[in-house]
Amino acid sequence: MSRASRAGWESEMLCRRPSLENVVFDEFDEAVHVVPIDYNADLPLYRSLDFGFVNPFVCLWIQVDGDGVVRVIDEYVRSRATIDAHAEVIKARTPDDESRVAATFCDPAGAGKNDVTGTSVVRELRERGIVTRYRRSGILEGIELIRRAVRSGDGQSRLIISPRCPRLIEAMKCYHYSDSPVGRDSELPFKDGLYDHPIDALRYFFANYNRASKITTRRY
């Protein structure tokens, strides 16, 4: 059962729906998933980025321990700033030398050229010493991977988040499906420009870190 999220298993096998119908990660519990954690130099360090200008640019610093627990140790969320400014903060906030960063994952859209600048965010970051990796993946695939970490089918949690990540914690609690009659039947969560960006950064991590996984997803 550990290969499926508990919400997915209960929906399929027990015909249950989440008690908070419109919340995507209804099993996220601050008492369980928010834990004071610091950088551990013995564990690999990852970063995961969601790009934005008017909407926030997000960077998450993540480690994975020997038991497969994903540890989100820090976050950076900022709107209306240049790539230069973001790169400077990202490097300054990274708790070890750049050479110790195992990978920096990002939104594949960042590889596209901007019509105004003629370059891409991925290239701009690379020129500033931040090399990114990405793979194309569906939103539902990433959501299911996060669900598995929040509470897998065997009831275990494999995701903890530092209190230093208030925006991600808030997003985990509030990321939701549409309340409107038009969007209510959609399997995709509502893009509100607030909660979706920290979640997007988290799912880019899971989609890349777990790239060998084959995921079956649905709205529960």
Image: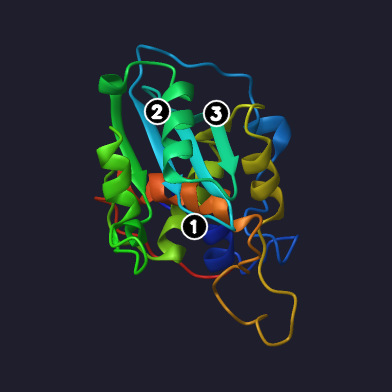
Crowd around label 3: few <14 · some 14–19 · many ≥20 (10 Å): many
> As shown in the figure, which amino acid type bears the numbered disc 1?
Ile
> As shown in the figure, which amino acid type bears the numbered disc 2?
Val
Pair 3/2: label in front:
3
Crowd around label 1: few <14 · some 14–19 · many ≥20 (10 Å): many
- Give x and y (percent) for residue 121: 35, 52
Secondary structure, mark 3, is strand
Marks 1 and 3 sit apart, C-alpha to C-alpha, by 20 Å
User: Could you say which disc has been placed on residue 74 in the image?
Assistant: 3
Check contact, mark 1 vs mark 2: CB within 8 A.
no
Is 152 or 14 nearer to us in this picture? Answer: 152
Residue that carries the numbered disc 2 in the rendered image:
64
Residue that carries the numbered disc 1 in the rendered image:
143
Crowd around label 2: few <14 · some 14–19 · many ≥20 (10 Å): some
Residue 178 in the figure: left or right of residue 212: right
- Give x and y (percent) for residue 87: 41, 35
Residue 16 in the figure: left or right of residue 219: right
